Image (cartoon, coloured by chain):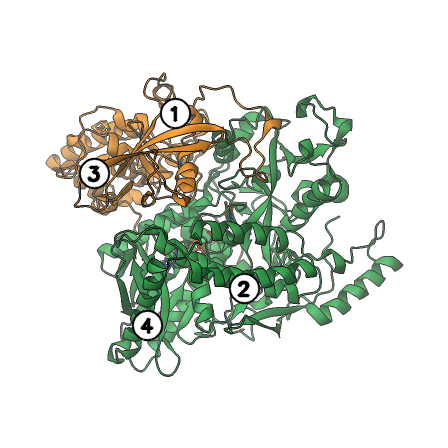
Chain colours: A orange, B green
Amino acid sequence: MSSPDAPDVRSEIRSPDLTTVPDGAAGDMVESLFTPARNNDIFDPSDEDAGRTERVVFKIRRQDDPFSAPYWQHFELSCSERDNVVAALRRLRTNPVTCEGERVDPVVFDHNCMEEVCGACAMMINGQPRPACSALIENLKQPIVLEPLPKFPLIRDLLVDRNRMFEHLKHVQAWVRIDGPWALTGALGGAGGTQKETCLRVSQQQWAEDYLYSRCMSCGCCLAACPQYDEGQDFVGPAALAQVRLMNAQPTGKFDRGERLHRIMGQGGLSDCGNAQNCVRVCPKAIPLTTAIGELGRATTVQALKDLFGG
Amino acid sequence: MNARSVIVVGGGLGGLLASLRIAASGHRVQLFSLFEVMRSHSVCAQGGINAVLNTKGEGDSVEQHIFDTIKGGSYLANQPPIKSLCEDAPGLIGTFERMGVAFSRTPEGTLDQRLFGGVKNRRTCFAGASTGQQLLYSLDQQVRRLETEKQIEKFEWWEFLAIVKDPNGRCRGIVAMNLRSLEVRAFRADAVVLATGGFGQIYSPKTTCSTNSTGAAASRVFQQGARFANAEFFQFHPTAMIGDDKTRLMSEAARGEGGRIWVPRQAHDRREPLAIPEAERFYFLEEWYPSFGNTVPRDLASRAIWKVTREMGLGVAGRDQVYLDLTHLDSHQVETRLGAILSIYRKFSGVDPLSTPMTIFPAAHYSMGGLWVDFEKDANTGGLRANSLRNHATSIPGLYACGECDYAYHGANRLGANSLLSAAFSGRVAGEAVSAYVSGLEQSVESDSHAAFDAEIRYQNQINHHFIHADGEENPYDLHRRLGSMMMDSVGVVRDNSKLNETVATLVELEQAFARLKLGEANPWANQTLAYARQVFDMVKLAQVVAASALARDECRGAHHKPSFEDPAPEHSQAGHKDFEAFRQRWKDNNQKWLKTTIADYHPDGPRIGYEPVDTSLIAPEEPRDYR
Ligand SMILES: Cc1cc2nc3c(=O)[nH]c(=O)nc-3n(C[C@H](O)[C@H](O)[C@H](O)COP(=O)(O)OP(=O)(O)OC[C@H]3O[C@@H](n4cnc5c(N)ncnc54)[C@H](O)[C@@H]3O)c2cc1C
Ligand code: SF4
Ligand code: SF4
Ligand code: FES
């Protein structure tokens, strides 16, 4: 999966099978082309450079600011078996010297959690949009080509501004309207009380479905891959649509279902999706984006009929 | 009522809930964060959040939660805030549920709960294994809604650098730097709430924390006069995956769900783990602590692992690692309940925990210590007085703190799944307190003179100038690495005075090294090295507080462990026995001396350490912690 010519193992495991685990474990696995390391060979962190033998070449697209021209630089780094792209970039910034021996500015990039949950580090790696922290070097074809995510304004080097994603979440009203952030005394106890009743009952089946969508980390990979999503376009993109699916199913979120559907019925909404299925193939959290889009398609049709005939 | 303006710095669980609460009181909020708030470290929390719902027929009670929290923290935390924390927990869960959090469910559709360390009842609500993510996103969504209603304004990609005080010493705003343009700008506010998270990065790379958990912001206000408390109490999580860029957490839930920790009885046993028969495995936690077994509190588990590896030489393959074994459990069940951590382990190690035991070791995880904050006790309830403007106020008037950057709830050791709770609860309380504070202000900050703001901008620009143009040989990345390895070595799982003395001195040298800095880039646009170097400097200043506080405290309490002052419970002796009672008396005598909050005050020559009494008005310290 990780190198362009590896067999695409992901497309098969994307379809949501609700009888199995919703936690994405199976879907999150990156198939290694190497045999997995034996447990006892585990990397010894006390020995900083142990196991760091292989020389790996990175080809990185650079751009000093939004207005200047991009250019490429090559770097060679020694990497260990379990290195990932973020770890490599972190090491590179301590001594950024190109293959030609030139000392250059450190590469600018974004990362926080280093465990594929914050969504910060998404970039194009060998032509695929994906989080860099979970991209293991050993699975990547060399030279490893790093580019910023397309579709978003570039800040510098591999750093982009994903603010549009959040504007789109505002547009589709991806939230549950609550009265306020205080406890509703009486419902779940409140000060001094213990639980008397739970507010909501949600079946395990429904939970499993909702949970799938609730892990979207706004990394933007799906948008980078979507042919319909672009800077000049209105299309809100698959991530925001999936959140509509989630909010509309939520017990209280349901109340604003109609409003959200209307938001995606016009221009920039659902009908802009060309059903290319790229989004679902690249989502690192295995979110069933096209399933959501399909369900929303049916829901908006029903809504349109309701709008026509009332009720 | 006059609408006032409040600045909240930090968009994790604490900061977002504070922002919502302040907005709900009708005040304007300006919310600052280093990056999009939904990428805050809170997103990493896996295991869950505690609240007594007593849904498992175990007779769980709020009183028990209070007791567990107090005792788990070795009585070092003030008790009134803990009482309110535990009482409000069920209501908070309700609030999150209303916001749409996908909490895991029982077959009846009610909230499911799981077991966590240091506790005997199932009390932890969870959302799969991504609880923090789910909680944070629900708040993020609410904040986004209030942005569209113009009640909250976000400043993402801005770094807080300093507070600004008026001539009376009140906090009246901040100076922050735009992380793209590097513009340094002042923002006025009637009050400021700091919710900038913990400081695990001073132990980098041996930490489970995100790269942004630097503590730099808290260090900055400390250097501006805010007091810091209990800095020596830092939690090392026993079960972190081995890694050289980061040590990733394998949640305590893995033990809660039945995971067992062991090493081969024989040193340097080279067999594959599953080829080793039961009888030749040393389940040391189960042997040493029969009643809690693998779910002993974190500090005990970390030290036990330290002991079998460092002292007994039984680490797997002779290294700093032990097994965390899930292979005996029902794989479907484990997959459903721990899927997220299994996937992290598989992804980053290439090994499947369902078929091979994981190898783990303790890593820096959570700062119990933090900015000192006040509280007001309600004489009637013994808990916090609602809406008191003293709650969560730092020692600088008008500056509040909540979340992991304060010190309030966990004493000497935090129980699992209590910190999402305290981050959320303290956010709400701080929000209420600051609303009360600004409502009572006579004069809005708008009429303040701009002199103090301008002066702070100039000062911060000078620092930037110095950092960018310094032409020495020290590299900030290297300084950070040196800091991390020194802290892990001498202010880590176990501590020793002579080593601590050395470290205090070396940390001064490390600070001086910044005079010989070389940044390596002068790009005036999105210069990440500049921001990073400034953070590392403030981390060194904070590490000095940690080391000095650790040096000063000559005892063993919770996460702070000095073997030369250890007085363990006598073996084979229980309450009532002569030996145990003598031990209890020694323990009480020691409490006379050390059951005190450590307070650090800033001084240019190094932190000044003092102490303040702990409010133990609810549960007198009669029971030494004993998890055997
Ligand atoms: C791997 C891991 C797992 C955990 N699991 C659990 C669990 O299962 N249960 C549990 O109860 N607890 C858990 N914890 C602990 C818990 O996650 C944290 O204590 C909690 O999330 C802290 O929240 P916070 O709001 O204080 O800060 P954070 O979430 O750390 O947020 C800090 C915020 O401050 C901002 N900030 C920082 N510095 C600046 C600055 N200078 N300028 C501007 N903004 C700034 C950041 O941008 C960020 O928005 C876990 C911790 C770790 C490391
Ligand atoms: S299916 Fe729709 S949203 Fe997904 S990539 Fe294709 S066009 Fe984009
Ligand atoms: S749907 Fe998937 S790919 Fe798209 S932003 Fe969310 S997590 Fe990323
Ligand atoms: S660093 Fe958080 S997803 Fe990669």
Mark 2 and mark 4 on one chain: yes
Mark 3 and mark 1 lie on one chain; the one further toward the N terminus is: 3
**What number is the disc on residue B508?**
2
Identity, as a three-letter code, of the amino acid under mark 1? Leu
Of B415 and A261, nearer the camera is B415
For the residues tagged 3 and 1, is the chain the same? Answer: yes
Picture coordinates of residue A155, whole percent (x, y): 24, 46
Distance Cα–Cα, label 2 vs label 4: 25 Å
Helix, strand or loop under label 1: loop
Q: Which mark identifies residue A140? A: 1
The chain ID associated with circle 3 is A
Q: Do callouts 4 and 3 mark residues in contact (Cβ within 8 Å)?
A: no
What is the three-letter code of the residue carrying label 3? Answer: Pro
Measure the alpha-carbon separation of dots 3 and 1: 24 Å
Chain for disc number 1: A
Helix, strand or loop status at disc 3: loop
Give the quarter of the figure containing the N terminus of chain B: bottom left
The spot of residue B154 in percent (x, y) is 28, 57
The residue identified by callout 3 is: A70
**Horizontal side of residue A120 vs B332, given as left or right:** left
Could you classify mark 2 by the number of other residues whose Cα lies within 10 Å: few (under 14), some (14-19), or many (20 or more)?
some
Q: Is residue B608 above or below residue B402?
A: below
- SS for dot 4: helix
